[in-house]
Image (spheres, rainbow, N blue to C red):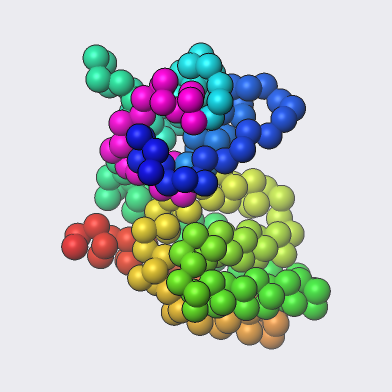
Amino acid sequence: MLSTGLPHGAVPRLERPGPLRDRVYEALLELITTRALRPGQHLVESELAGHLGVSRQPVREALQRLNTEGWVDLRPAQGAFVHEPTEEEADQLLTVRTLLEAEAARLAAANASSAGVAALEELCAEGERAVAADDVDGAVTLNARFHSKVMELAGNAVLAELAAQVDRRVRWYYTPIARQRGRQSWVEHREMIAAITDRDEQRATRLMREHTEHTRRSYHERAES
């Protein structure tokens, strides 16, 4: 365990080329959304710079950007801390997610090809295997890929752009409840695939709305407990 609480192997490699500050920003954002850096955790510039193999300047710039976007809180005389989302923040974000994804499911049912349905089925099978292996990180990643594929099959670029803006925060909120949702989440995915295959727009919309509502409710139940 590293001094900032990062497990060995958690720090992503910085891809090249590209502005260093942007690569540091992406690396830190990934660590936050996967909860390798946990809400409320103190972020020490020198330690993060050492883990990422960079100077403190791009780390400082990345933290300022993350602060602007609401991922990090900069506190006078205290330093930087991973933001701790409030119940209201989570509720608002997950409500917007329901609206976007319910419409994506409807459009996917109207437009999906057999190849698109096959891709959903493969992602679902991989997700089921991840749950069976108790691979929480894998399940979270595959869940995001499944929903991204539904959005892709919807064929609406504007809708996809809006969904991309909330995708990382959805992952952030989903990660702590992934084990709790477990197999049931993938049962619901299977039901959605069936509705999309049958081109039943109304059923696909209803199932996606119920599915995302289950996630929202699970997040609040965990927070209350």
Q: Quadrant of the C terminus?
A: bottom left
Q: Nearer the viewer, residue 9 or 32?
A: 9
Q: Residue furthest left?
A: 225
Quarter assignment of residue 86: top left
Q: Is residue 123 above or below residue 8?
A: below
- Is residue 106 something one can see in this rendering? no
Q: Is residue 70 above or below residue 196?
A: above
Q: Is residue 223 above or below residue 192?
A: above
Quarter assignment of residue 48: top left
Number of marks:
0
Percent coordinates x, y for residue 68 in the rendering = 44, 25
Q: Quadrant of the N terminus?
A: top left
- For residue 4, side relative to residue 125 (left or right): left
Q: Residue at x 67, y 21 (%)?
A: 19
Q: Nearer the viewer, residue 119 or 93?
A: 119
Percent coordinates x, y for residue 138 in the rendering = 54, 63
Q: Is residue 49 magenta?
A: yes
- For residue 192, side relative to residue 224 (left or right): right
Which stretch is magenta?
Answer: 32-51
Q: Residue at x 65, y 65 (%)?
A: 150
Percent coordinates x, y for residue 210 in the rendering = 44, 73
Percent coordinates x, y for residue 61 in the rendering = 50, 18
Q: Nearer the viewer, residue 121 or 11?
A: 11
Q: Residue at x 65, y 51 (%)?
A: 160
Q: Residue at x 54, y 72 (%)?
A: 130
- Is residue 223 something one can see in this rendering? yes
Q: Is residue 224 magenta?
A: no
